[in-house]
Amino acid sequence: REGNYNDGDVHDYAELTAETLSILVNKCVNVFEMNGVRKGTRLALYLPALIQMPIAALAAFRIGSPFLPICAMNEDVDQLVALLQTSACEVIITVDGFWSGTHLVRTKYILDDTLARLDNSCRRVVLIRHVTPNEGVPPPQRHIVAKRPHYLYKVNMQEGRDLWWSELFAQVSAQRQATTVDQNAPAMLHPVWSEKGVSLMSRSRDELRNEIEKWAQYIHPTGVCFVMCTQDACAAIVAMLAALCCSAQLLIFEGIASYPDCSRISQIINKYEVKTMIVSESDLLPVLQNEEYAHMWSTAALSKIIVIGTHAIAARASALFGVPSESIMPPWQHTDSSLK
């Protein structure tokens, strides 16, 4: 996991082994069940690109809880109200906030405003501490933009509804037994927007598994797979799970392609010797539109770029970076396009 902040003397990164990931997923299952999540309980994953995203998705999949990935980069309260009202999610997994370049997205504030406009269908919010400081830690003399923790940002916890992710994880064991779930049961929900509002498309466990396995075929199985998809949470989760499915090393970047400039992605590729990069068209375009930075990319380690988008953008990336590029279009994006 590579953090948003960029400084030659500061390295905001973390590594998890496969064993640790398995333990965290088991604990997450137990946390969900402790909070009343069962087969069929709808769960919202209102998260940016954090390691908790695939952990929560895998845990929900194991229980048989249909999950709705929500793009945390979208700060539109009206759209979030519509999504949560339509989905009737009982439990929301979210983050206190996060840096998108130099912009602080106050996720908890946005969610609080949203839930104040809804009925009581959401009974639990599980909050990941990501950018707010731990209680009792004195603030620094100087506050640095884009760096965690950010001491000028605080969140309120609603008693009886909001709980901290870390505190819940400390209360549960890593032991659990397998759960039997109907493979035709819904696994992932995807929003489809139209002039009439939002509806939800459901993908069964079999359909989601097939999609993950399909994407896994594009990934180099023995190297690092770098996933960057900030605008489509469903695609981000499928890509992350595909990397884990084929035993590649998953690399998640918490920032954006243009911070501090468009050479950042190249730096990450070289730092981690990335073999496969899965990137959305919207995340790749800022780089393609700044060719002076694109020409600076060093892609010696990179064997393939997978563009979540059109063939035209994949071909453009291949020509510019000299790396074989392919495109993949998630089935829900076909559905969205047909309704616009």
Image (cartoon, rainbow, N blue to C red):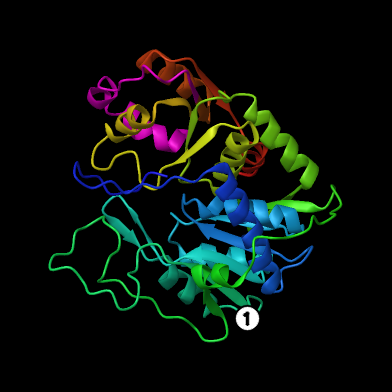
* Residue type at the position of mark 1: Asp
Q: Is residue 141 above or below residue 208?
A: below
Rendered view: 78 above or below 260: below
Q: Nearer the viewer, residue 27 or 256?
A: 27
Answer with left or right where residue 293 lies relative to residue 317: left
Q: Is residue 283 magenta?
A: yes
Q: Secondary structure at mark 1?
A: loop
Residue of label 1? 119
Outermost bottom residue: 159
The image quarter in which residue 282 lies? top left
For the C terminus, the quadrant is top right
Please state the extent of the stretch shown in magenta in the rendering. 278-305
Please report the residue visible at 74 percent of the width from the left and 35 percent of the height from the top: 210
Confirm whether residue 105 shows in the render: yes
**Horizontal and vertical percent position of residue 8:** 19, 41
Q: Is residue 67 left or right of residue 302?
A: right
Vertical comparison of 66 with 82: above or below? above
Q: Is residue 195 among the parts visible in the rendering?
A: no
Q: Nearer the viewer, residue 294 or 4?
A: 4
With 177 as the anchor, is 274 left or right in this view? left
Specify the quadrant that holds the N terminus.
top left
On the image, which quarter does residue 271 sit in?
top left
The structure residue drawn at horizontal position 37% and vertical position 66%, both measured from the top left corner, is 106
State left or right for residue 130 relative to residue 174. left
Percent position of residue 191, x then y = 63, 53
